[in-house]
Amino acid sequence: MSGSAGRAGAPKPRKRRRRPRGRRLTTVDETSAGGLVLDHEREHAALIGRLDRQGRLLWSLPKGHIEDGETVEQTAVREVKEETGISARVLRPLGTIDYWFVAQQRRVHKTVHHFLLEATGGELSDEDVEVTEVAWVPVAELETILAYADERKLVRKAADLIAPDKLA
């Protein structure tokens, strides 16, 4: 026998699904804003949980689309309030993440502007239809709880900014 055909345990070649010829996906750009929201003691951060297609709860930083006439800072504050119930103020920019995905027959290039924010009031609420759960999570546990590597990287970057004397 030659090659791998017929060998016990040999992986079968995977077939890639292809789009029918002539149907190109439309590429669109989307921009969002949000961030890392800290409590007054800067010991906890407000996270949102959403269910993925497999029904797993994935924790992430609150964020959402920029509305007409809004700055990225205004969007971050509004989205934090809408998704978590927490009112917050922007302390400083934290970084930008961009990624690609396909949804609704479109190829989407998404850019998300993240800020370091401090809670100024409100109570945790998961009333936003896009959010399954919200929680205050100890800052020390964020890297093990956040679902996305890019957000974990932002949290590492924020670690030295969280010290109270650096944010005053």
Image (cartoon, grey):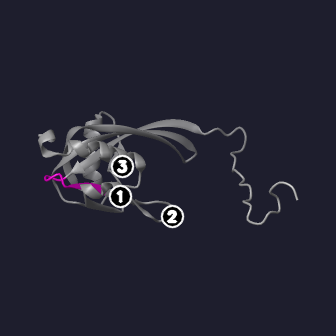
Above/below status of 110 relative to 85: above
Q: Earlier in the sequence, mark 1 or mark 2?
A: 2
Q: Three-letter amino acid code at disc 1? A: Thr
Residue at coordinates 67% horizontally, 40% vertically from top-left? 23
CA gap, disc 1 to disc 2? 20 Å
Residue density around tag 3, few if under 14, some if 14–19, many if 20 or more, within 10 Å: some
Residue 54 got which mark?
Answer: 2
Q: Nearer the viewer, mark 1 or mark 2?
A: 1
Contact? badges 3 and 2 (CB < 8 Å)? no
Check disc 3 and give the amino acid type.
Answer: Arg
Contact (CB < 8 A) between labels 1 and 3?
A: no
Distance from disc 3 to disc 2, alpha carbons, whole Å, reads: 22 Å
Give x and y (percent) for residue 144: 35, 58
Q: Is residue 126 visible?
A: no
Q: Which residue is drawn at the image coordinates 17% and 53% (left, top)?
A: 39
Per the image, label 1 sits on a secondary structure element best described as helix
Specify the label residue 167 is tagged with: none
Q: Which residues are magenta?
A: 39-47
The relative height of residue 92 versus residue 127 in the rendered view (above or below) is above
Q: Which mark is residue 144?
A: 1
Q: Are marks 1 and 2 in contact (CB under 8 Å)?
A: no
Q: Nearer the viewer, residue 39 or 141?
A: 141
Residue 161 magenta-drawn?
no
SS category of the residue bearing label 2: loop
Q: Which residue is mark 3?
A: 152
Q: Quadrant of the C terminus?
A: top left
